[in-house]
Image (cartoon, rainbow, N blue to C red):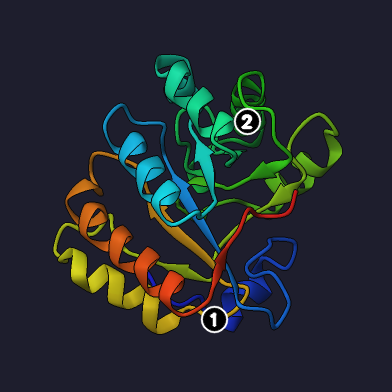
């Protein structure tokens, strides 16, 4: 189960998470989870370049290690990166010490003050532990809108419509540069980029 638009009560449960960037200016924040991926990430980078858009890529440490050149391309093309643990741990199912160690392992490869918990699943005790380690990313980034591109029951047009219908100025939007999302992402992302471009939105980096 998932919710495309983040409800207020979920934001209340995790008040230290950043769900949206305040402001009335026409700016949205495109984010991409689970990469880098050898085929999908280059496609995303090419699409962003086409519309002069910037994105923030929440990377898995082991994928950075496997695809270091693609990771470097994200940075050299002017995008931002964030920590998404070393191997996509579910915080709810992981002992706190192991979770923190996993983030540290990713942090040795990913220089960023941004962290997004995989699945959005993190315990309050893990958030407190992160805050006690100054060497770990301190900005815990959640989201305002899910594209649902990971849902294999959907078509890419549906994912694009979810984003377009629910996004507002300041929305943090989640896509996935992963093999699982590819069938939907390759349809949804160009449509979303074109919509925001034609409607005068800036697609910006998340503030660190």
Within-10-Å neighbours for mark 1: few <14, some 14–19, many 20+: some
Please tell me which of labels 1 and 2 falls first in the chain: 2
Q: Which of the numbered marks, if any, corresponds to residue 145?
A: none
Is residue 109 rendered to the left or right of residue 16?
A: left
Q: Compared to 61, does 5 lie above or below?
A: below
Within-10-Å neighbours for mark 2: few <14, some 14–19, many 20+: many
Distance between the Cα atoms at labels 1 and 2?
31 Å
Residue at image mark 1: 168
Q: Residue 93 versus residue 86: which sits nearer the camera? A: 86
Q: Position of residue 188 (x, y in %)?
A: 27, 62
Q: Position of residue 154 (x, y in %)?
A: 16, 66
Where the N terminus falls, by quadrant? Answer: bottom left
Residue 4, visible in the rendered structure: no
Considering the numbered disc 2 on the image, is that residue within a helix, a strand or a loop? helix
Q: Residue at x 46, y 80 (%)?
A: 199
For the residues bearing labels 1 and 2, Cβ distance under 8 angstroms: no
Camera-nearest label, 1 or 2:
1
Q: Position of residue 128 (x, y in %)?
A: 78, 47
Q: Position of residue 102 (x, y in %)?
A: 59, 26
Is residue 119 rendered to the left or right of residue 159?
A: right
Residue 165, visible in the rendered structure: yes
Asked where in the image residue 109 lies, by quadrant, the reply is top right
Residue at image mark 2: 103
Q: Residue at x 22, y 73 (%)?
A: 158
In this rendering, the count of numbered labels is 2
Is residue 163 rendered to the left or right of residue 93?
A: left
Asked where in the image residue 136 lies, by quadrant, the reply is top right
Q: Residue at x 59, y 35 (%)?
A: 95
Considering the numbered disc 1 on the image, is that residue within a helix, a strand or a loop? loop
Q: Compared to 170, does 102 lie above or below?
A: above
Q: Residue at x 36, y 42 (%)?
A: 46
Q: Compared to 121, does 18 lie above or below?
A: below
């Amino acid at each position: 189960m998932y919710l495309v638009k983040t409800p207020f009560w979920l934001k209340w449960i995790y008040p230290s998470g950043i769900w949206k960037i305040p402001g009335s200016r026409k700016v949205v924040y495109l984010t991409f989870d689970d990469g880098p991926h050898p085929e999908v990430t280059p496609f995303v980078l090419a699409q962003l370049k086409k519309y002069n858009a910037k994105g923030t890529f929440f990377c898995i440490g082991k994928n950075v290690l496997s695809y270091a050149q693609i990771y470097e391309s994200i940075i050299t093309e002017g995008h931002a990166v964030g920590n998404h643990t070393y191997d996509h741990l579910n915080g709810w199912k992981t002992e706190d010490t192991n979770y923190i160690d996993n983030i540290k392992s990713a942090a040795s490869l990913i220089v960023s003050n941004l962290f997004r918990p995989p699945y959005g699943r993190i315990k309050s005790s893990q958030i407190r532990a992160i805050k006690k380690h100054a060497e770990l990313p301190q900005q815990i980034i959640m989201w305002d809108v899910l594209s649902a591109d990971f849902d294999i029951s959907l078509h890419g047009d549906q994912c694009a419509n979810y984003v377009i219908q629910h996004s507002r100025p300041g929305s943090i939007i989640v896509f996935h540069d992963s093999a699982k999302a590819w069938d939907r992402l390759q349809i949804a992302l160009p449509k979303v980029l074109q919509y925001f471009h034609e409607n005068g939105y800036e697609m910006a980096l998340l503030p660190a």
